[in-house]
Amino acid sequence: MDLRLNGKRALITGSSIGIGEAIAHGLAAEGVAVAVHGRDQRRADQVAKEIAAAGGKAVVVLGDLTNDDDVRRMADEALRLLGGIDILVNNAGGSGDKQIWESTPVSDWATAYDRNVLAAVRVTRILLPKMRAAGWGRVVNVSSLAGMMPPATGPDYSAAKAAMNNMTVSLSKAAAGDGVTVNAISPGTIFTPRLEAAFRKMAASNGWVDGNAAWPDIERAVLPHVVQVPMGKVGQAADIAHAVAFLCSPLAGYITGVDLRIDGGVLPSL
């Protein structure tokens, strides 16, 4: 299917690694010129080189999204290098150690909110007016299933993602009349090297299966002890990238204010 994205320009925050990297590759494959963002020059350059080698267009912008001056400089650089930004994917964020309530200091709550919510706010505030003036734009906020289905640990992260979901709905209403859609996606358990290492360690320490076994054997043995996924497997970063590409496309022009769960059926509600 042609998503009609050829010629669009996108900034994907936190795209030098992980889910953000997959989103950058996915949009580039659809003909989008992408600004790869991160704080590690080497990693960001590598992603851009891989996109270029596959026939896409990519530039690199660096910056700390918790710093107002860095964000302004980074956004201005992306606008200059690409000639404008039509699509913003607020992917940067993340969680710290998943501590219990009593051991999670107030400073961690503030840090989680800054890294996940305010980081997205800072970039959006700069780019949204330009999208509105152009009469077309897409904002996609990468949230988490934890925002709707919070575990007992890591309450700071879950609360921040819940705030991001709320922010998405508010912004979607504010921008709807100007041709700008704003949506969120909430990944469930997604494969990463860090997740694989954790699963292998759990498998070995509990004697469920040899920690050096093939990944499908590790996945089958460990996943039911971590989360009940009806599909029986973890998701892939490409699953997230495909969903983001669709939400960014003109084909999704009447979809705004939604939170698209990509969780293999984990959430037990509508």
Image (tube, rainbow, N blue to C red):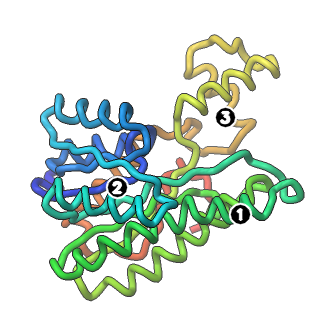
Q: Is residue 221 left or right of residue 232?
A: right
Residue depicted at x 71% and y 63%: 109
Task: Check disc 2 and give the amino acid type.
Answer: Val
Cα separation between marks 1 and 3: 28 Å
Residue position for label 1: 109
Say which quarter of the image contains residue 270: bottom right
Q: Secondary structure at mark 3?
A: helix
For the question of whether residue 196 can be seen, the reply is yes
Residue position for label 2: 244
Task: Check disc 3 and give the amino acid type.
Answer: Leu
Estimate the x, y position of residue 67 in percent, counting from the top left: 49, 61
Residue position for label 3: 223
Q: Is residue 165 above or below residue 81?
A: below
Estimate the x, y position of residue 184 in percent, counting from the top left: 44, 65
Residue depicted at x 74% and y 48%: 98
Assess whether mark 3 and mark 1 are in contact (beta carbons under 8 angstroms): no
Residue depicted at x 64% and y 11%: 212
Estimate the x, y position of residue 15 in percent, counting from the top left: 38, 45
Q: In the orientation shown, which residue stands out farthest toward the front?
A: 69
Which one is nearer the viewer's eye here, 244 or 96?
Answer: 96
